[in-house]
Amino acid sequence: MDTDNAIEIYNVDKRYGGIYALKDVSFTVKRGHVHSLMGENGAGKSTLVKVLTSVIAKDSGRILKDGKELKIKNYEQAVQAGIALVPQELSFVDYFTVAENIYLGRQPLKKGTNLVDWKKMYKDAGELLERLHISLNPRALAKTLNVSDKQMMVIARILKDDADVIIFDEPTARLGHEEITFLLEYIKYLKTCGKSIIFISHHLEEVMNISDEVTVLRDGCVVASDIPITEIDEKKMIHLMVNRNVDTREDYTIGRVFGEEIFRVEHLTRKDLVKDACFSVRKGEVLGFFGLVGAGRTELMRSILGIDSKVSGDVYFEGKKLDIRKLKDSITAGIALIPEERRQQGLVLDRTLRDNIMLGCRQKISRFGFISRKNEISMSKEEIERMNLAYQHLEQRASELSGGNQQKLVIAKARCRGENKMYVFDEPTRGIDVGAKSEIYTMIAEMAKNGITSIVISSELPEIQMLCDRVIIMHEGQITGILNHEELQSAETVMKYAIGG
């Protein structure tokens, strides 16, 4: 190795039809450094990762590893070359053990047979985990692990193959505060071991914490490459990403006026997950729910909305007691859910944008059982453009959109009904860029001014602080604190309640 560079990318292009997904992309990842790749959703980051790992082929350009040009044709060859990906969507088998997942498809066999050598596999897995400083039981079932431990299991599987260039794609998107801190420290540890890291995140504070250099993409092009982290701040980074100024600490609650109580929950309990939850929210109010991983926020909302059953408790909406037995009942009452998992729960990915928008509201445009195609197209286009969604045409599949635009599509689908009086947003900006975040915050604030109530479940404290009039804090299934807008500006106070104080 006669170079200090682990990866060198020169003039890479990738086109789909006549449209550039990547155009003349060049940057360098130094050996033993963390290089962050920044950009809005749709900027080309995912396409570049797929090119680097040979999931898709580039049209032109050169990629060098350790000074030698890479000539690989698939992901397996990329792994053999020492390049590996920790994806945002973790891939593993729930009912396999940690060791089985680590050696999945490559289990050691007993000599001269096709039988798995279980004793050797568990021994090797234990030694590997110890060497990697990963505290997992090789015999634990994957389904019993929390999200952070599942991620570490996937990292162990990758490091087993001795990858020296590791791409982390939105690795903290599903982690809580403590788990994020642990993962960032572990990435720093990998750096001390000589690993080269490409880090992709929309969380600017993480990028500032962990990076040595930053490259920014916009519309498939590099707008700034190999910038030392000491020479850039969050404000400049945002401007490079979105080509406009975005205030990441704006107060969206200014001038908000509330009406009467619109929604109330009394003594809701769900087995061991939620314990005697009581709260209310007013018309036009934005009420936040905050807590660490496992606090019970999503479980509480799922029980309220009829997705999961509760043991006891009552729900009142507009002064009337609701008998909610399934999600359709809450939708009929005028309560819309924007779910945490947009790809699994919010969209039908292989259907068109028009089909997704129209789900649940075709009755608005049908007469005598017949659907007006003209009205369907007009309404779909109106909702999509109201959300400022970047798309090619209405018959485009939802799977082809970036994460931020998929989230906008989920919201457009819910807003299309036009009869919602309250929205429940579960992690509304997870895995999306600062520009799209700002647009969603503005939308929630505008709805509040028009008397529409929102409940926002978020693991991002700055998001709660900017957007919410009050916050309910949960710990291990219990409500431990209710803070007003002024009180929740103290991160120390919020975290005190979040850890059970």
Image (cartoon, grey):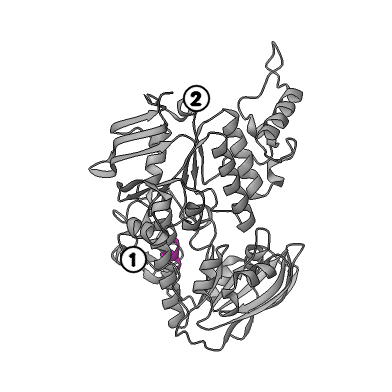
Location of residue 125 (image quadrant): top right
Residue 58 makes an appearance in the image: yes
- Tell me how far mark 1 sits from mark 2, CA to CA: 43 Å
Vertical arrangement, residue 279 with respect to residue 235, above or below: below
In the image, what residue type sits under mark 2?
Answer: Gln
Relative placement, left or right, of 65 versus 184 is left
Q: Position of residue 175 (x, y in %)?
A: 59, 54
Residue at far bottom of view: 260
**Which span of residues is magenta-colored?**
410-414
285 drawn magenta: no
Q: Is residue 412 a member of the stretch shown in magenta? A: yes
How far from the left and from the top, in percent, is residue 500?
A: 73, 67
Residue with the most extreme left position: 18
Dividing the picture into quadrants, the one containing residue 318 is bottom right
In which quadrant of the rendered image does the C terminus lie? bottom right
| Near-viewer residue (94 or 476) | 476
Viewer-closest of 251 and 119: 251
- Neighbor class of circle 2 (other Cα within 10 Å; few <14, some 14-19, many 20+) is few
Residue at far front of view: 230
